[in-house]
Structures are given as C-alpha cells and as structure tokens.
Image (cartoon, coloured by chain):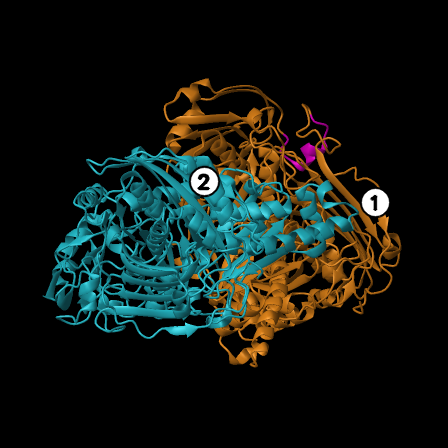
Chain colours: A cyan, B orange
Amino acid sequence: MKVVGKPLPKVDAAPKVTGRAVYADDMLPARTLHCKILRSPHPHARIVSIDTSAARRIPGVLAVITGSDLPVKFGILPVTQDERALEHEKARYVGDPIVAIAATDEEIAAAACDAVAVEYEVLEPVMSIDAALATPKDERIQDYGGPNNVHKFVALEFGDVEGGFARADHVREDVFFYQGNTHLPMEQHSAIATYVDGRVTLWSSTQVVHYVHRALSRVLELPMHRIRVIGAAHGGGFGGKTDPFAHEIIVAKLAMITGRPVKCTLTREEVFYAHRGRHPVLMWVRTGVTHDGRITAMHFRTALDGGAYGSYGVASTFYTGALQPVTYDIPAYRFEGCRVFTNKPPCGPKRGHGTPQPRFGLELHLEKIARDLGLDPVDMKRRNYVKPNTRTVNWLRVTSCGLEECTQRVLEASGFKTRERRPGRGMGFAISSYLSGAGTAIYWNDMPHSEVQIKVDRGGVTAYCGAMDIGQGSDSVLATVVAEELGLQPSDVRLVTADTDTTPIDLGSYSSRVTFMAGNAALEAARKMRELLVQAVAGAGKRYEEVSFEEASVLAEARFGTLTTAGSYTPPKIAGPYKGSGVGPSPAYSYSACVVDLDADARTGLIKVNKVWIAHDVGRAINPLLVEGQVEGSVYMGLGEALMEEQVFRKGLHKWPSMLEYKSPTFLDMPEVETFIVETDDPEGPYGAKEAGQGPLLPVPPAVSAAVYDALGVWIDEVPVTPEKVVEALRRKDKGETPRYGPQRFPAIPYPETIKVDGPVGHQDGTC
Amino acid sequence: MKVVGKPLPKVDAAPKVTGRAVYADDMLPARTLHCKILRSPHPHARIVSIDTSAARRIPGVLAVITGSDLPVKFGILPVTQDERALEHEKARYVGDPIVAIAATDEEIAAAACDAVAVEYEVLEPVMSIDAALATPKDERIQDYGGPNNVHKFVALEFGDVEGGFARADHVREDVFFYQGNTHLPMEQHSAIATYVDGRVTLWSSTQVVHYVHRALSRVLELPMHRIRVIGAAHGGGFGGKTDPFAHEIIVAKLAMITGRPVKCTLTREEVFYAHRGRHPVLMWVRTGVTHDGRITAMHFRTALDGGAYGSYGVASTFYTGALQPVTYDIPAYRFEGCRVFTNKPPCGPKRGHGTPQPRFGLELHLEKIARDLGLDPVDMKRRNYVKPNTRTVNWLRVTSCGLEECTQRVLEASGFKTRERRPGRGMGFAISSYLSGAGTAIYWNDMPHSEVQIKVDRGGVTAYCGAMDIGQGSDSVLATVVAEELGLQPSDVRLVTADTDTTPIDLGSYSSRVTFMAGNAALEAARKMRELLVQAVAGAGKRYEEVSFEEASVLAEARFGTLTTAGSYTPPKIAGPYKGSGVGPSPAYSYSACVVDLDADARTGLIKVNKVWIAHDVGRAINPLLVEGQVEGSVYMGLGEALMEEQVFRKGLHKWPSMLEYKSPTFLDMPEVETFIVETDDPEGPYGAKEAGQGPLLPVPPAVSAAVYDALGVWIDEVPVTPEKVVEALRRKDKGETPRYGPQRFPAIPYPETIKVDGPVGHQDGTC
C-alpha cells in the first residue's frame, strides 16, 4: 500500500496550525446579531411567569424568545424527546435555558437578559442517586420513566447464571464508584444561523451534523431540505457536542424571526452546564471463578446519575453492561442497570461512553479476585481473555481481537513482571475493549450509516461525505482511502464534508464509528471509481499504472461521461436476539492494554505518574501518526479522570464551572507515553481498521488505581484517585480497617425481573 | 408536465433582490489586500524598462509584480495563446496591463502604481482595418498570423458557387459596416484569491469557471487540483467575462506571494479596456437570385477589427460566415473572412458572437434585392427560409426550425402587412438564427460538455453542476429539470454550481449552451435517479406517485445505499467535413423574427422606437418567464447597438470609457416589447428546448434600419443608426445621390484560395 499505513500529516493540519481554519465563532457575516441565553439559577423550579417587556425595550434588542416560541420537544434519542430549546414550564438544573435574546452586541443581549423577570416556584432539588431513588418530596423531575426519579431500567440475563455461580470455587462481591466529569473541549460550543429565502443555514461546532439537521427540522417545523447544517471547523468534542443543543435551535429560530445572521457562543461556564459528560456510576459486581481463576458467572449492577434529561442515557445505561463479555470470556452474565434523573446538567456520552466506569470496577474486581485466589492478576486476566471470532454470551460478535498481543507488548516494554517492588512505587495493569461504531443508528432505520460520493473529472478528484472531522482525523482517513485506491496522495483529494446540502449522510463523529464506517463507504466508492478509470485506460491499450491520473481521468471522462461513484456502509445483519438482528452494539471491537508506573507518596497521598505504556489493537493503522495521537489523547484524558477531574455539585450548584477551578491535567502533569499499535487486520474494517479514539482511555483509570495498590497497598475503589482518598485509605489501613477508600454499599434498586436470553450455541471459543 | 413550462420565479431571485447575494467585490476576508494594475498609456509601444523600486518602498505595499513574474502566455483558444497577465515586452493597446501591486488599501495600491516608472519606446499605432492590412511602419502588433497585421483568414466554398451565379437572373453586391460596441455589464469584473496550504482558491465574476481554471493552471504552473475556481454571484457578462482575464491570474499570483487574500475589482474605465466586445465588421456580399427571388448563390466577405489580441477571434471570424445557410436556404455559398490586429482592446464574444454583424448586412441586402426585383421583401425572404430537418450546404444540421411560425406571429401582431404608410413612420422586419451551444469545446477533446451529479438522501435532493448562472437563469433551469423528473418544485432542489472542487464540469455560460447541454445532462441524471426511487417504491408495493418524496428517498436509500446518479452531454457526432465530424457549430438552432415600429424625424434624424414585436423559436420554454426576460434583454441590447452604442477610438485613445459618455439605452429609451414564444420541440433539446439568450438580439438592428428606410426612404447601411447618419443620408437623397449612409468600399484583402467543400448530397429539403 502506498499511503495507508504511512504517518502522513493531517490533510487539515495547515489551516489549523496557521489559524486559517474558520470556527463557528470566527464567522461574522454582515449584520450578525449576538444571542445570549438567560438560564435558570435554580436546580428545580416551576416557572410561574416570564416578563420580557423591559428586555424588549432595550435599544439594540431585536428579538426575545421564550419556550412558547419553541414548544416542540426534542432529544437525541427518539425514546427520550424530553428537552425544550427554552423551558417555560419547569427548570430542571442550574443552567436550564429559559429566555433567549438577539441583540446587536453581546453586551446588550446580556444586559437584556438581566432585565428579564422570571418568577419561579422553587422545588426540592434531587442531587444524588439515593435521593432520586427515594419518593420525591415535590414532583418528579421528568414525567416519564419511573418509579420515583428512575429514568431507565435494564435487566438482562444471558446463559445459566445461577449454574455458573453454583459451579464456582470462589465468589466475590465489590462496590465501585466512578465520579462524573466533563469533556472540557478547548473550543466552546458555538453556532451561527442565517435565514435566507425560506431556508435556514446553521454552522455549528457539532459532532453530529445529521442529527442536528433532524432536530432542527422537528423543532422549527421545517422540512429537512429547507435546512442546511454545516459543521464548522471543530475545536474538540469528545462526546460533548454529540447532542442537538438548545443554542443551535435558538439561533436558527432567531434568524428566522429577525432575518439576520444570529450567533451564539457559549461562555465557558455555560459549557459546564451544557455538559452531556461522564455519568457518575455506582457499581456492584459479583463474580464466580474456579480455583484457577476462570470466570464461571458474573452479576453486574450499575446505577447512573443521569442529570436532568435523557440525552443518550438509555444507551449509556446499556453500555455500562454490554462490553464485559466482549473483554473477558464470561459464560453466564446478568446485568442490571438503572439511570436516574437528578437536578444537574444532563450526562451523556464522553469518550468511551458508558464503558470507562464498568472497566474501572471490573478490572479492580478481577485484581482482587486474583489476590483472593493467590494468583497473579495479569495471568488470571489473560486466562479469561475473549478470543477472536467469538460470539459472546450476550450474542455480540467479536471478529479480530488483539488483547493477548497488546498485553505482551506493554508487559515487555514496561518490565511489569520484573518490576522493582518497593513502597511508594507501583505499576498497574489493565485492559479494555471498545466499539468501532454503533451497530444501529440512534433512530431506527434500514438506511446506511455512512455514505460517500466521489467525483472525478479532468480537474481532479473530489470526495463527498457527511462525516465531521472533530480533530480525530476523519477527513484525513477519507482522503487516504480514496488516494490509496486511486494511486494518489491524500493531499490530492479534495474533500467536501459535514454539510447536509452537499454531502451524503454520515451519522456523525460518535461511538468511534467514522474510520470503520465512512472508511468502508469511501473504499466502496473509490474502488468503483478505480474500476472506471482502469477500464478506460485499458480501452486505450494501456495499464492504469502506466498513465498519469490526469490522463486516466480524461480517458474515462471521454468514455463514460460524468464520473461519479458512490459507496455506503450499513452494519451487517446476523441472526441474534437484538432488534433488527444485527451484530449487536458494534461490528468490530478494538482492544487495549495498559501499564501505568507511578510514585505515590504515603505521607501526602500525592501521585506522580512516571510513564504509561499503552498498546492498542486498531485493526490496521490507516495513518499511524493519527492513531498515536488518538491513543495519547485518550491516555491523557484517562489520567485526568483517574486523578483529578470531577464535575460535582454543592447545594444544587456546580462546584467548579470554570477552567481555573475544574482540575484537568496540563502539559506539566503529563507523563511520557509509549504507544504500541497492534494490527489484527479486522475482516470487515477498511484495510482491516478498527477504532482508535476512545478505547485507549478505558484501561488507564483502573491501571492507575492498581498501581496505587501496588505502591501503597490500599485500594482506591473510586475515581478520581485523589491524595485525600489515598491518605484516608492509608489511615484506615494503619488502623487495621479494610485498606480501602470507596463506596460502602450499593443501594436497593427495584430492578424489574431480568429478561432471560439463552446464550448462543457454540462459537464462544474463537471458531465463529 | 408539472413545472416545465410554468412561469416560476428564478430560484435565486430572493438573494438577488434582497441584496444577500455575495458578489466577488462583496467579499472581504480578514487581511484582504487590494490590487491595482498599472496599464499602458500608449496604444503601441515597446517596454524598455520598468522601475518599481519607489513603489515597493511605499508603506502598505506588500507585493509588486511585472510580466517577468508571470511570463507564461495564455488565451482562451489553444491556437492563440498570445496574452500575458502583465506585459513586459510590448504594450499593444491603451489599457494593456504592465504592473500589478497588492497593498493594504486600494488607494495605496493606486499611489504605488503612480510611483512606477515605465520607459516606453512608442511605436506607430494601428487603429483601423485598412491600416492593419497595410505594411506596418514599425513592427507588427503580434508576431504570428499575417501578412502584415492580419490575424486569421478563412476562405471556404460550399457547393457550386460559380454555377449558382451563372444561373441567377439577378446579382447584387452591397457593402455594410457594423461598428464595435461593448457589453456594459452592471457589475464590473472582480476577482479575489486566497492561497492556503498550497492551494489557490479564486472567486471571480466569470462566465467560464472551467476555462479560468485551465488558464490559472497554465500560467501559475500549478496542477488543476491545486486550484479551485468558484463563480461568485454574477452581475452580468453578455460575453464580456468569457475569457480568462489578467486580473484573475494576477490576484492568484499575488495571493501566492503574500499568503493573504487579494482582490481586484476593475474600475469602470478598466472594464472598457478589458472589453472582448463586438467586433467592428466590414462586410461585402454578392448574391444571385432567380427572378422570383430564390437565392442561387452567395459570396460573402467579412473583415473584423480584432483589437490587439486573439481572444475568441478565430471563432468570431468563422461565426461571421457560418450561419447564413442556417437562416436561408443558400444552395451555393462562398465565405471569406479576415480578422486583423489593431492597437485597441481585444474584441471577442458579445451576445450573438460574430453573428449580429452579418445578420445586419444580409437582412438589408435581401431587402434591397427584393426591391430590385419588385418583390415584397418579407415574401421573398420567406421563400428562402431554411426548412426543419435540413443539412445546409455548409453541412450544418438544422433540426427544428420555427422561422415561418415566428414570422407569422410578428407579422400578425404588428399588422405589418397592412401598416399605414406615411413619411416619418416605418416598420422593419428581420429574422435570424443562432446556436444552442457550440458543437465543439474551445479546446479539442472527446469529453462531455456538461455534467450533472444528483444526490438524494433522507434530507432531500442536491444537484451539482459546473454551470455558471450569469443571470440567464441556468440555476433555475437545472432545478426545474431535476424537479420535473422527481415530481418536486424547483425550490425543493438544492444546487451546487460553478465550483471546480465540488461540481462536475460544465464548459461555461457562452454560446447559449447551458439550457441545451447542462439541461440534457440534468435530464439524464434525474431520470436515472427517478428510476432508483421508482424501483425502491415498487419494492415496497407502492407507486412513486402515491408516496411522499421523503418516503421514496428513505426506501431507496435503504435499498440501494448512497443515491447518486450522473448525466452528461456531448454533442452528437455525425458524418461531415468538420474536424471530429460533429454536427457543425451547434446541435440545434434557435430562430427569431422581429418587427420594429418607429418614428424617424426627417429634420433631426432622431429615431423613436415605438414598439418591438419579437417571436423566438426556443424549442420549448422550460420557464417562459425566464425566456421572456432573455428575449426582452436581447431586444434591449439590440436596440442599443442599432441606435447608439459604439466603442470607438481617437488618436489611439478610447473615446468614451465611462458610463456617462458611452451611450446605452435607459429605461426611458426602451419601447414596449411584445414577445411570442414559439415552441418547436427540438428532438434533442431537454424537453425540446433550445437557446433563448442571444438569438433574439440579431434581427433587431436590421429591422431598425429597414424601418428607417420604410419611414424615410434612406438606407443606413451601418450601425449605430445615429441621427447624424440619417440626416446625412437624407441630404444625399435630396441632392439626388444614392439615398444611403454606409461604407463605400470593401478593401482589397489578400484572402487565400478558398477550400472547396462539396455540399452534402440531399437533405437540404427538410427530409434529413
């Protein structure tokens, strides 16, 4: 291969580093109005009245809207259409949008917000999982789901769980907690809309151009072809720009009202309220093992603190349970999940969506079981690794799996097995798996998930795809695939992306789906185009490799006319128990293994990470430079979550809604990272590729916590692993108590009866 | 048909009338530099030296370039690559660009131009056809062509001309002159370029995005895929923006040098120098007829004053000869054409390109022959009308032809035959034919002339085409064709046009080609798309007409994946004597007939046009409102040329390079126009359509002149028909001289020996 596998620079590197890329907030068309949003100061309150008359009188104010102007509810999942762009009935968290104002200046819009009088009837806020499970004193936060403030229950049982526990030699239970945290993108959310000739155009910093398109159509009550959504240059999403947002709908509506461009860029504080970040998850797990450490059954429970709205929460809840049997060979598995509403900004998908939390709990749980049995934890884990070509007990289809190779790489490089053992110095090991795209769209349909068009003419080649480059390099992947097939360099391929008018649909940059899905669509389109070119060149008595691309194009254009080809990708449908009988959550799974080396100070609890070794089974690195960037970024984010980040609340208020107070690692906190790319050549990925951008985050927090145990002999069973917690655990150890910091109990949750699903017959042995 | 044939508003009407359309000069990206061009003050001079040192020292000047920075020559026709973006060897007309300067402000750039010192060696200017034919005193203007300052000779003979004259009962010779004039678009030429990451992007007010793309690639020595040309919103071209222009190349080069956006908007004076307008043409014609007025042979000579460069001149020369047998059945035809270089701005294509001049001469010539024979001129002309389905003596293929129906319409509506005959009041009648696109591209190739892609997804339909809407409504035609086939309204179709990155190629908006060619390409693409939709709907057990377009799209997207189709148009190839054996100049010809009613004052010579009746055989009006607009615009422009417009020179200088001095009709000068659309359903046009935008100009000047004869009994054998000429002709009439104003002689031109081509056997009788 000529370009696949080469560490070429990103195709959009130059505009990004030279400051020429146009982000949504950079746009300022003539007569642009600026929008500010008045937000609820109460976590839970009925809205009695909204008086905007004084605001409307302020010179420079051109439009003031409230919820009655945008009454239609929306939400990312069809089953939870529970948000309004502006709430006029009830505020559900501090930051819930109530009034939006378009004015000639941001300052005037802000002053006009101050002039709005909203009368609230304050309700008791629900600020914890326990409070949400209790009978509410006032009304429920949402009027669906239930009981109390439960949003969603999941209760599933695969295989013979009872039998599995019965034949276990040892059974252990543990409780873990993973604190919530947020994405902290460098670029704040920003959107700008115009309304010309009956058509709305929205430029937004979004990861999901298509879903924003659908939401705008629904709420604005305009057909989709009267709305154009364009993904502006993107300054970071990490899942935080994967919902349609109130401000996107608001600027469109204000543009429709005023006939002028309207822009809204969230303040940094508002970004903390927009959130959709990592769910705080409380976990309980019970696992049975044989004396040699083979898992016989697992029962896993999660309780997710969802915040005030649904967002992706139903999916998040499933995801906390789904991937355990994809990581380890669990022959019988029972999962009970529960998401509750609380009066906080809604949680949603953050890098690793729903899976870092169970990964944290499960990896530590297995560490403890190994120690119970006197086994080496790494050896015991390896004994249970899922094999390639497996149907898991929950029917998920594993194709390629490089777990063992990833493990070997990091163990060897780090010298884990032969590490020096001394107090205050530790190493931890953990593994993980992750999706390469979701097997189903967020709205149920039979259409492709990714579509690519290619045009070739005498002037060159252009590829069109709805995929949104959020910095992960999807534009580069698209260009590389097309270039590889046509015998060009990626920089030769002109791209049109993330524009609902001009590009065919791609579902968006979430669930690590773009390389796998848009890559496959591009591959199909490019191969069809190459076939046309080869035919035309052959017709002139030559071979494709002998002529210039321009000559081939001219021959083909003369022979076939307009040269346009298309490719698309739809996840395969295979017999199974899931809706639509697909491959389950994902058509392919990535795998990671990680070793963390750290110093932990027994006196202060301070942790200094010295080095991280991470190996990632990406299937095939279409661009190893980009894969390394994604892996390192994941490690960075995983360290932040492991050691310091938490989005927490006090008396209904966000504790730290600023970049000064919300702690996140800086360059100075970042250790050396040694990355190993493992290529397992997935049979269905483009050139064998799988995902790279999310999975490598997952093993980092449990590896950190395991390393702390290795260094100090205390278990920190919740993230972040802060000095205070370490010191407290050491204090308990010194007092002869359980040398542990973490949750003591898992609440009594009225899960419904589990739906029992027989595991698949056979094919759990790597012969699928 | 649901939308074809309906007088729907233009799809781009709202942005145009509300001022939201973005013209090139409206664009002002951050850090834009402004370019001014220093031009030659001499019509003919060798450039001895250029000293730019003082200009470079002026604060705010970022780049100064001369011809040595852009030495590669270009030109629209491959055979006449004789222009440089900046001349450093010789200036050939007042206005020839010499130095270009990019500065932070227009005023600084202009001041820097003033600071440039250019030393010229002045040469004798050549300012007339006669002077160009004479041996030059100094060097020739161009170093190719010849002899003397002859640029191009054409000498062709079809059929038995000698025999035709021998069997004539009457032979007449006449000489006519058609003065040059210019396009006078409301929008001045403007272009802005950026250079980012090794790629040039140019937005320009051009009619020929693709040819500008090619010229930039040639002169900047960059491959085409490193250049993107986008047609900005267009404020009028009429042929005047159909060449690649120096300023387009200059801003691209300056952007490459400075790394900043660079804009150049020509001043109105510079637009007069940019020109490429109507060639002044001197004509001599000799025709033999039978006693009943049937033409037996014609010998036609033209001499074109080409200005300083080639431009489209070779084509213009052919065009002055080609269409006579397409209008009238001429069984034997000899044509000799000659274009000379003079030291004036280059002439090129203006609405009707090369054909209004011969039409003027020929129509008046036939009027005079009829009077010689005592025949009614209209009856005699009708006797000679070309018939549908004819191969003309010069092998051109006429398909549909509505000449007779057009004639009937205007005669009936105007009451021409029964008009009141009184001194000072007159009516004139004339006809014409015109191309529906050129049969060959301006560079020889076998590729399509127009290409269209269509994308459909769950969000709607998008059509992509390189065609440039210059106000003629090509975007509306594209949308209408796609909408008709898919059962939508034109406003439902999203368009991407005139962008070399994102749209497949269309050769441009010239020679009235877009409706016919891009229309056919759109039709093919849309029918393919409809077929996919129909199949998918049928697969769901329904009929296409029963379901919504959205439902059909969803079914088809689910069944076929990415929905993209393409269509293209290449003119048919038919046996004949022409290069590549095509259909000749055009795949189809439009026809017009016109009656002009006017008052002509015998004392002052003032002419007041009362009304114009015009019938135009458009084949099929895809949008009758747009056709009427095109026809009325043509009449308006024809009246301007007939009565007042002239681009003329005195002592080497343009006499009237301003809108104050250059006379063109205003609203107040415009008479009522009654337009008749004649539909002949051309067998190869989209829905039967042919051209509308140029042909109806042609009959207006001869009809005006014939009406003046009808009113006053004097022949004005040249345009413009000014009061001075009318008064002079009347003075001659009063003195008993020939009652005529016009050229007295045709120069002795050393035409080469004619190339004799046998006319086609048969098929000149409407049975082809």
Give the tally of numbered discs: 2
State which quarter of the image contains the N terminus of chain B.
bottom right
Magenta residues span B126-136
- For image coordinates 71% across by 57% down, the residue present is B571
Give me the disc on residue B405.
Answer: none
The chain holding disc 1 is B
Whether residue B129 appears in magenta in the rendering, the answer is yes
State which quarter of the image contains the C terminus of chain B.
bottom right
Q: Which of the two residues, B440 or B316, is positioned nearer the viewer here?
A: B440
Residue B256 in the image: x percent, y percent? Answer: 49, 32
Secondary structure beneath disc 1? loop
| Left or right of A616 on screen, residue B735 | right
The chain holding disc 2 is A
Q: Which of the two residues, A318 or A490, is positioned nearer the viewer here?
A: A318
- For image coordinates 26% across by 47% down, the residue present is A716
Q: CA distance from mark 2 to mark 1?
A: 86 Å
- Mark 1 sits on what residue? B754
| Left or right of B193 on screen, residue A111 | left
Q: Which of the two residues, B709 or B623, is positioned nearer the viewer here?
A: B623
| Left or right of B661 on screen, residue A72 | left
- Neighbours of disc 2 within 10 Å: few (<14), some (14-19), many (20+): many
- Mark 2 sits on what residue? A410
Residue type indicated by callout 2 = Val
Residue B600 in the image: x percent, y percent? Answer: 54, 58
